[in-house]
Image (spheres, rainbow, N blue to C red):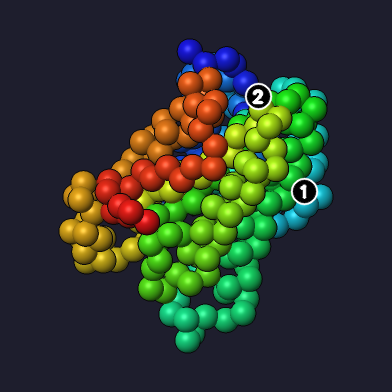
Amino acid sequence: MSTARTVLVTGGNRGIGFAIAEEFVAAGHRVAVTARSGEGPVGSLTVRADVTDATSVDTAFTEVEAALGPVEVVVANAGITRDTLLMRMSEDDFTSVIDTNLSGAFRVVKRASKGMLKARFGRVVLISSVVGLYGSAGQVNYSASKSGLVGLARSVTRELGSRGITANVVAPGFIETEMTAVLPEPQQAEYKRTIPAGRFATPSEVARVVTWIAGDDAGYISGAVIPVDGGLGMGH
Ligand SMILES: NC(=O)c1ccc[n+]([C@@H]2O[C@H](COP(=O)([O-])OP(=O)(O)OC[C@H]3O[C@@H](n4cnc5c(N)ncnc54)[C@H](OP(=O)(O)O)[C@@H]3O)[C@@H](O)[C@H]2O)c1
């Protein structure tokens, strides 16, 4: 088993974030989640935070630090979509997705880096998407936000790599969550035809990769983009 760590997962009240928090709890870590509504899994501490607001992120970290100690592993998972074709995409459709998915991750990682630098240890995991590097019609905003996370992780790696801090990107393909449940059935079937694995993944299949990349065995992996996409994005 990996060393028990204090872990914070953003958006841990449902979907992939919930599964990630569950997996860390099961592995014996001290786990907190941020949520705007609802709660994280049993055994985790839930704190309120909106990642579009730096003060709210700061308050959440302070609460977690008081209850569980300095955050050693941070998983920036909170994300939204506002899909529409480029010609129809409003400025607000674009900036709100960037503000949550990319600037939100920046706020969380910046706040986490304080404690990590002091401890000379940290694991930063950013939840991106296969479409960050593959591209996706109707998702100019979302895929731009998700590819931005690669630059973020790689720059953090170069800046903080010598202080025992790693930063990696996990890039899921299609995962069975509320985000994909809203897709019309024919579209889901079409996607499944293009995925070499022929199916969507469960949230726990992503969660187990996240706990591994944050664990003791992955200390020399940094700046990597780890696909969990059934082969959909090969080479991207
Ligand atoms: N599902 C997929 O197929 C898939 C594929 C690739 C990548 N991803 C990525 O994986 C991550 C999780 O996706 P999911 O499918 O689990 O999505 P989800 O079920 O829609 O959950 C999204 C989570 O993000 C939180 N969130 C959204 N905006 C926030 C904000 N401003 N501040 C704080 N929290 C916020 C939500 O909180 P509330 O409950 O309060 O709204 C929720 O906990 C996302 O980054 C997504 O882009 C998903």
Give the camera-side residue of 192 and 72. 72
- Badge 2 marks a residue whose secondary structure is strand
Residue at point 65% right, 62% down? 99
Q: Position of residue 4 (x, y in %)?
A: 59, 16
Q: Position of residue 185 (x, y in %)?
A: 24, 63
Judge left or right: residue 186 versus residue 234.
left
Three-letter amino acid code at disc 1?
Answer: Ser
Residue at disc 2, CB closer than 8 Å to ligand 1: no
Query: Is there any visible trace of residue 64 in the rendered image?
Result: no
Three-letter amino acid code at disc 2?
Answer: Thr
Query: Is there any visible trace of residue 68 in the rendered image?
Result: yes
Residue at point 20% right, 50% down? 196
Residue at point 58% right, 73% down? 94
- 206 w.r.t. 179: above or below: above
Q: Quadrant of residue 43?
A: top right
- 62 w.r.t. 194: above or below: above
Q: Position of residue 11 (x, y in %)?
A: 58, 45
In this rendering, which labeled residue sits more in front, label 2 or label 1?
Answer: 2
Q: How many marks?
A: 2
Which quadrant, please, contains the C terminus? bottom left
- Badge 1 marks a residue whose secondary structure is helix
Q: Label 1: which residue?
A: 56
Give the camera-side residue of 179 and 194. 194
Neighbor class of circle 1 (other Cα within 10 Å; few <14, some 14-19, many 20+) is some
Q: CA distance from mark 2 to mark 1?
A: 19 Å
Judge left or right: residue 160 versus residue 125.
right
Give the camera-side residue of 48 and 52. 52
Q: Quadrant of residue 159?
A: top right
For marks 2 and 1, the one nearer the N-term is: 2
Q: Label 2: which residue?
A: 6
Residue at point 81% right, 50% down? 55
- 188 w.r.t. 92: above or below: above
